[in-house]
Each structure stands twice: as C-alpha cells, then as structure tokens.
Image (spheres, rainbow, N blue to C red):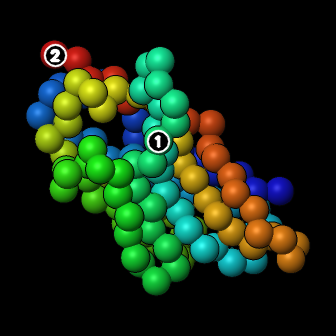
Amino acid sequence: QIQLQESGGGLVQPGGSLRLGCQASGDIERINVMGWYREAPGQSRELVATINSDRRTNYGDFVKGRFTISRDVSKNAVYLRMSSIEFEDTGVYYCYLDAWRAGDREGHYGRGTQVTVSS
C-alpha cells in the first residue's frame, strides 16, 4: 500500500503565501511524478503542478508564476510554495503520486488539504 500525507493547508489572505507539503510512504519502488491537483468549489479537479524524476516541472495555466513546486527525493516528499494567492485559489488541494509498486505503475491521490482564501 501507498499512503500520502498532506500538510500545510489553511486560511490565508489574498496576496499572502502558503506552503503545502506531502510525504509518500509505503512499498514504493520508484517514483515517476509527484504533484498537486485541486478542486475549487463546484469545479472539477485540475492540475496545479507536477514534478518528475528529472525535476522537470509542469504548471496549470492559472498559476502564472505564482507557485513553485519542489521535491525532496530522500524523503519521497513534494512541496508547493504558493505566493500572491488569490480568492480563486480556494479549494481542496490533493497530492498526487505516480509510482511503481510491486511491478505495476500506479497513480494515487491524497485525501486533500483545504486552502481557503479570505480577507
């Protein structure tokens, strides 16, 4: 089994910053991609950012340079630094893992962490 433990969500004011973290554990053979998706109220899940084993990053169009994803390979962890936060960034943020386990390639989401932007 693979577990994803997210942290760092909460209440933040517009223009503020927040750092999300996620640590993967379990019988992981090799991680391909880690990242973040989000669900805003009433909307479908969308890509926020991903980072692969070569540290190549990919961001959703709405990010526009405001967020930075990073990874700590030694800890099987991924982080999302959010800056210049906007009201529209409110939502549940899900950690995502694409990894090999028991010879199979699997995708996993965490339970999510709530980010609420309010003045």
On screen, residue 48 versus residue 32, left or right, reads left
Q: Could you tell me which residue is drawn at 14 percent across and 41 percent down?
A: 84
**Residue 103 falls left or right of residue 4:** right
Residue beneath disc 1: 46
User: Disc 1 to disc 2, how far (Cα)?
Assistant: 24 Å
For the C terminus, the image quarter is top left
Task: Find numbered disc 2 in the image and state the secondary structure of the residue it sits on.
Answer: loop
Is residue 113 in sight in this rendering?
no
Checking the image for residue 119, the label placed there is 2
Amino acid type shown at disc 2? Ser
Q: Which numbered disc, 1 or 2, marks the residue that appears first in the sequence?
A: 1
* Foreground pick, 80 / 26: 80
The x and y percentages for residue 41 are 44, 19
**Residue 42 visible, this angle:** yes
| Kind of residue at badge 1 | Glu
Q: Is residue 61 above or below residue 69?
A: above
Residue at 40% across / 35% down in the picture? 9
As helix, strand or loop, the secondary structure at mark 1 comes to strand
Pair 1/2: label in front: 1
Q: Residue at x 51, y 53 (%)?
A: 22
Point out the residue furthest to the bottom here. Answer: 54
The picture places residue 61, in percent across and down from the top left corner, at 29, 50
Q: Residue 87: image x %, image y %?
A: 23, 24
